[in-house]
Image: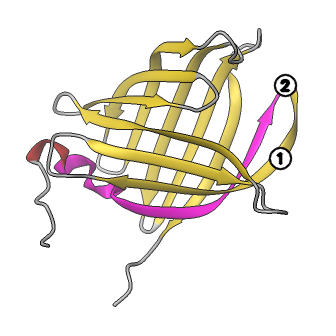
C-alpha cells in the first residue's frame, strides 16, 4: 500500500507529523507536582485535517495516566482549530494560529460531563525545533485562574529501515 498524499491545506502543519516521545512535568495550584512519560502522534489520511492522539504514563510503574484524541484543522492561511476529547469527560475546542514551526491556541469552548472536573479555559502552545517538540498547556479549572499545568519536551521517533 502506498502512502497517502498530504492534503495541500495540511502542508503548513507537516512539521508536526510523526510520533513524538519523551517526558513532561505537571503542576497546578491544587495538586502536587508530578512527572510523566508521554507519546503524541500526528498523522493524516489525505483529508484536510491531522489526527492527534496523546497518551501519558507514570514513569515509576508505567501505569497509564491521561489520554486524549482529536483533530487539528487548518482553517485559513495561518488559522488552526483543535477539536479533542478526553476519557475523563472533558472536551475542548481551541482556535489559534500556526507559523512554520509552532501553534498557539486558546479554547473557544470547554465541555464537561456531569462527573468531570470543572475546566473553564485552556491554552495550548506547541513548537518544533529540529527533532524536538515542546509544548505548554495552561488551564483555568476548579475555581483557579489560568495557570501552567503541563509542559514537556518530546523527541521525534525515527522510522526504521
Seen at 27% across and 48% down, the residue is 13
Q: In this view, does 24 lie above or below 47?
A: below
* Quadrant that contains the N terminus: bottom left
Q: Distance between the residues labelled 2 and 1?
A: 12 Å
Within 10 angstroms of label 1, few (less than 14), some, or many (20 or more) residues?
Answer: few
Q: Is residue 103 above or below residue 55?
A: above
Which label sits on residue 118?
A: none
The quadrant holding residue 105 is top left
130 within the magenta span: no
Marks 2 and 1 close (CB-CB < 8 Å)? no
- On screen, residue 54 versus residue 38, left or right, reads left
Seen at 78% across and 61% down, the residue is 59
Seen at 12% across and 72% down, the residue is 2
In the picture of the structure, the residue carrying the numbered disc 2 is: 29
The residues colored magenta run 11-30
Residue 119, x across and y down, in percent: 65, 16
Q: Is residue 135 above or below residue 96?
A: below
25 within the magenta span: yes
Residue 144, x across and y down, in percent: 76, 13
Seen at 17% across and 51% down, the residue is 11
- On screen, residue 56 versus residue 103, left or right, reads right
The quadrant holding residue 78 is top left
- On screen, residue 84 versus residue 60, left or right, reads left
Mark 2: which secondary structure? Answer: loop
**Which residue is the extreme one toward the right?**
32
Taking depth in this image into account, of 129 and 22 the one nearest to the observer is 22
Taking depth in this image into account, of 91 and 94 the one nearest to the observer is 91
Which label sits on residue 34?
A: 1
| Mark with earlier residue (2, 1) | 2
Q: In this view, does 45 lie above or below 146?
A: below
Mark 1: which secondary structure? Answer: strand
Residue 92, x across and y down, in percent: 48, 22
Amino acid at each position: 500500500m502506498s502512502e497517502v498524499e498530504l492534503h495541500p491545506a495540511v502542508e503548513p502543519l507537516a512539521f508536526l507529523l510523526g510520533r513524538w516521545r519523551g517526558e513532561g512535568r505537571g503542576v497546578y495550584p491544587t495538586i502536587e507536582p508530578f512527572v510523566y512519560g508521554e507519546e503524541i502522534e500526528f498523522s493524516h489520511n489525505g483529508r484536510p485535517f491531522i489526527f492527534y492522539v496523546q497518551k501519558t504514563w507514570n514513569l515509576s510503574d508505567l501505569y497509564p495516566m491521561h489520554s486524549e484524541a482529536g483533530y487539528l484543522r487548518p482553517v485559513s492561511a495561518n488559522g488552526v482549530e483543535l477539536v479533542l476529547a478526553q476519557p475523563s469527560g472533558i472536551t475542548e475546542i481551541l482556535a489559534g494560529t500556526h507559523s512554520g514551526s509552532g501553534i498557539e491556541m486558546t479554547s473557544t469552548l470547554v465541555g464537561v460531563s456531569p462527573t468531570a472536573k470543572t475546566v473553564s479555559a485552556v491554552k495550548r502552545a506547541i513548537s518544533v525545533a529540529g527533532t524536538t517538540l515542546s509544548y505548554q498547556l495552561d488551564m483555568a479549572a476548579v475555581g483557579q485562574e489560568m495557570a501552567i499545568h503541563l509542559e514537556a519536551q518530546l523527541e521525534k521517533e525515527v522510522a526504521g529501515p
